[in-house]
Every structure is written in structure tokens, then in C-alpha cells.
Amino acid sequence: MAESGSLPTGFGELEVLAVGMVLLVEALTGLCLNSLTILSFCKTPELRTPTHLLVLSLALADSGISLNSLVAGTSSLLRRWPYGSNGCQAHGFQGFVTALASICSSAAIAWGRYHHYCTRSQLAWNTAISLVICVWLSSAFWAALPLLGWGHYDYEPLGTCCTLDYSRVDRNFTSFLFTMSFFNFILPLFITFISYRLMEQKLKKTGHLQVNTTLPARTLLFGWGPYALLYLYATIADVSFISPKLQMVPALVAKAVPTINAINYALGSEMVHKGIWQCLSPQRSGLDRAR
């Protein structure tokens, strides 16, 4: 961790400023877009459906990632972590919970869309609620394990944000990494890919394919894949051979996922798009107050 007024090891003044600005831009963009999505769900009755509940869960998770990025960006501009060791553990836990919830919510949406488009039956409320509860309880469970000793949270190379510590190459880290990655990255990625693939095969002939079947899986793979590769490399080689600047790339890439998800799932949906504009429209707001 960088001391107050000093530069982190391996970073120059301009590089620290650039990382901080990128994190702030990603945080504010993700917060704005996902907040609009959440607001539209709260104010638009047409969006209160089981299927859209899964999208709301994703928007909440992505808002949490953006808040985590906001703290990291602010700390980067200060060139130090001002919240102490306990703050680092809380920051790592909060970021890990929301990241896992975002990944698993994307998989839940993929399955929900497959169920809707391929079985031609509406997703039941109890099924959607159960999925959301499972996503968040599972994410909280896995994120809490490093606090209990299986895995560990520590500072990222910049020293101004915290994540799962991948510098400790031991059996504890390796066992946690592979177990966690299977249930929270490989399995959700497989569900997402297979669900959209089956949808595409079934609906392409009819010409009624109304959703993007490739972007969700690509977002998971390219958004969180760099972290997975970094963690995997740490299990087989000394991660110190990778420059600190390069080690920060996965974090910067992952913090852009909330913006991509908001564009794909919210702004890319005609119904959610209408709900957002209804929330922003003064005339609509006036009508709602009159009623």
C-alpha cells in the first residue's frame, strides 16, 4: 500500500492519475445507467414481472461494482488507501459479493430467457424470487470465506483498492480459487452460453429472435476472463514477474462490465427503455403525480 504522498511501486504520477480517472469514469457511468434501470423498475408497473426481476438483480449487483469502483477511483487519486486494514477487508468483500452476484445474475437471466422463449411459458414469481435469493446467498457465502480464512483479501498492486489476494501461492489459495472459479465463473459461463445457443438454434428458423445471443457470454468471458487468467497464472508461477501496471488491467476491464450490462439488458430492451424514458419525462412524472 502506498503511503500518503508517495507513488505506488511500479507506477508514475501520470499512470496513477490515469487509473484513478478511468475508475471514476467507469464508476459514474455504471452508477448512472444502472440507477436509471432500477428507477424504471420501481416506477413502471409493466416492468414488474418475474423475468425483469432477474434483470433488476443484475442492475443492483452492477451498481455495487460501480460503488466499489468509485471508492477505488477516489483512493487512487489520493494515492493511498485511507480506510485501514478493516476497510480493505470490507472493500474486498463488498466487491467480491457484487461481482459474483453480477456473474450469476447474468446466468440466471440467460436461463430465464431460454425458459421464456423456448418453452413459451412465463417464468413463475416463486421461481424468479428463488433464483435471486440463491444468487445473492451464494455470492455472500463465497465472498465471506476469505474473511473466515479460506482465501484472503489484500491490496491490489496500486495499493488503493482491495481484492482476493493472489500473491499467496499456497494450498489455501489454490483450493479456494479452483473451487470458487468452477461454481462462480465456469458454471455460470456454461449456463449462459448453452442457454443462448439453444435459444438461437430453436428460434433462428422462425425469425423471432429478439435478444442478443452472443454479447452476454462474451461479456462474461472478456469482462471477467482476465481476472481468471491472472489468478490461474498465480497458481503456477510467480505473479511478481508480471508488472504492477499489467496486473491492474483485469480490474479496469471488470469495472466496465456494469456499463456493458446496462446497455445490453436495459437500454437494449424496448420495454426497459420505455420505462427509463417515462421516469425521465417531466410530462409522465406530472401525470403520475396527478393520479
Image (cartoon, rainbow, N blue to C red):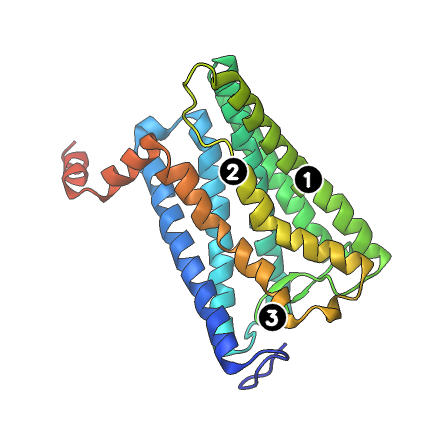
Q: Position of residue 249 (x, y in %)?
A: 58, 62
* Label 2 element class: helix
Earlier residue among tags 3 and 1: 1
How dense is the environment of label 2, judged by Cα within 10 Å: few (below 14), some, or many (20 and up)?
many
- Could one spot residue 109 in this view of the protein? yes
Residue at the spot of label 1? 186
**Mark 3 vs mark 1: in front:** 3
Quadrant of the snapshot with the C terminus: top left
Q: Are marks 2 and 1 in contact (CB under 8 Å)?
A: no
**From the viewer's perspective, is residue 42 above or below residue 210?**
below
Q: Residue at x 45, y 35 (%)?
A: 55
Residue depicted at x 60% and y 32%: 193
Q: Identify the amino acid type marked 1.
A: Ile
Residue at numbered disc 2: 216
Real-space Cα separation, disc 3 to disc 1, in angstroms: 26 Å
Whether residue 41 sits left or right of residue 99 in the image: it is left
In three-dimensional space, the C-alpha distance between marks 2 and 1, rounded to whole angstroms, equals 14 Å
Q: Is residue 137 left or right of residue 60?
A: right
Let me know if residue 74 appears in the view: no
Q: Amino acid at mark 3?
A: Lys
- Tag of residue 248: none
Q: How far across and how far down the image is residue 240, in percent? A: 74, 70
Q: How many C-alpha atoms fall within 10 Å of the one at disc 3: few (<14), some, or many (≥20)?
A: some
- The three-letter code of the residue at mark 2 reads Pro
Residue at which label 3 appears: 245
Q: Residue at x 63, y 78 (%)?
A: 10
